[in-house]
Amino acid sequence: MDSKAREALAERALSLSTADHTEVTVATEDADLTRFTHEEIHQNVARSDAGLSVRAILGKRTGTASTNVLDEESLRATVDRAIAIATLAPEDPDLAPLPSGGPTTTPQGAFVKATADASPQLRAGMADAIFKVAESHKFWCAGFVRTQSAGYTIANSSGARASFDGTDSGINVKMTAADSTGYGQEYSPDATTLDAHAVASTAAGKAKNSAQPRAVDPGEWTVIMEPAAFGEFFAYLAQHFSAQSYDEGSSFLSDGLDKNYFGEHVSITDDYSNPLAPSMPFDFEGQPKQRVKLVEAGVAKSIVTDSYWAKKLGRENTGHALPAPNPYGPQAIDLVVSPGSKSTAQLIAETKRGLLISRFWYIRTVDQKKAIVTGMTRDGTFLIENGKVTSGVRNMRFNQSIITALGKCEFSNTQQRTGDYWFSLVVPAAKIESFTFSSGTQF
């Protein structure tokens, strides 16, 4: 379904509503995934769906309903169900008017037709390139190649009208050797730019170079996290920039903005137009997104809002609403960490003794307000001695506050789109002092 069809559907649903105010969201998705292990594709799945949701407002009461059956009868039933739910909902004195939207510009490169049209053969070809690398090293590999496209149209009774089409693709590879593993990943809106051979070679090189891993003592270490690892670690800070978390006291920012929480090298922006991760220029209320400086030179500058939290806190609406209803409030979903001035090689060369970390896994929150998380290293952890990577080391468990870690850090000069989260993340590699490992492993 193209944008014109979505817009016609949204207008039809709006015309059926008798609520005081109505918002309609039409979303389409075509997602394809090829998974493999031991140099064989074992799963090739595709999902295609289109759905419509309605938010009806009666006075201070709100009801939402959704469907993916899009005939006239279902549209009427969905609109009527949203209104019926609104009549039963409790009143919310803080309920805000629906925003009226405004002009937006889709970032260049957000939609790539070749990605939207990607075939199973394209993904199979990338998998085959990965298999050849594994076989040449006599390793076995596992992972996935995915491609997807999505379209969104938002329309409401306050006049907001917004449509967006975007694509995304990714490769995730784990190489397994006799006593070591390695990891590689790449994500892009343009599937034709993914280099499966290069990603596989990176993973294979890590598996090869971390063979016969040494045990090192837990404690405080200087660590250099490659972008994949730093992205997994940093991602647990995203929720803290929500106006809801800020107001309800679960964010470290609840202690106040304009405070120096991090080191001088830390600047964080929410930017939907970043070339590495171009995304939707409006939120799920149809409000144009602002490019928001969240942290500048270590000092917290702002939070993100939607219409509800902007009204409640007396702040400007930054255009960061999620689909209604949701328990998370507005979210910064296009996070970018500014780069530093040195290459990753320079950061390693300046390290007398430390650890180079490829990625983490199973990170979990220990203390939400203090942003303390725990997790394990995985798929390539290396010892740095006198400025050189000298050997692989066994995996270790960490317990660390992200806030404290970013108080003593330095970034590389190259950013990467990283991770496969529900939001995008662009980060450099990070050198962090006094990073706390609590225990080691036997693998």
Image (cartoon, helix red, strand yellow):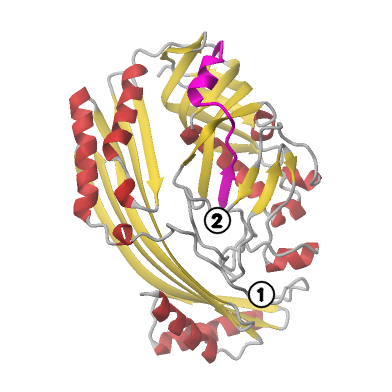
Tell me the quarter of the picture where residue 323 sits. bottom right
Q: Which mark is residue 99?
A: 1
Q: Residue at x 29, y 29 (%)?
A: 201
Give the number of the mark in front: 1 or 2: 2
List x then y, in percent, for residue 71.
Answer: 38, 86
Query: Left or right: 126 with respect to 19?
Result: left
Highlighted range, magenta: 334-353
List x then y, in percent, for residue 192.
Answer: 30, 50
The image quadrant where one finds the C terminus is top left
Q: Is residue 170 visible?
A: yes
Q: Nearer the viewer, residue 111 or 242?
A: 111
The image quadrant where one finds the N terminus is bottom left
Q: Is residue 341 magenta?
A: yes
Q: Nearer the viewer, residue 275 or 317?
A: 275
Q: Residue at x 54, y 11 (%)?
A: 217
Amino acid type at mark 1: Pro
Tell me the quarter of the picture where residue 159 sits. bottom right
Give above or below for 369 relative to 405: below
| Residue designated by label 2 | 272
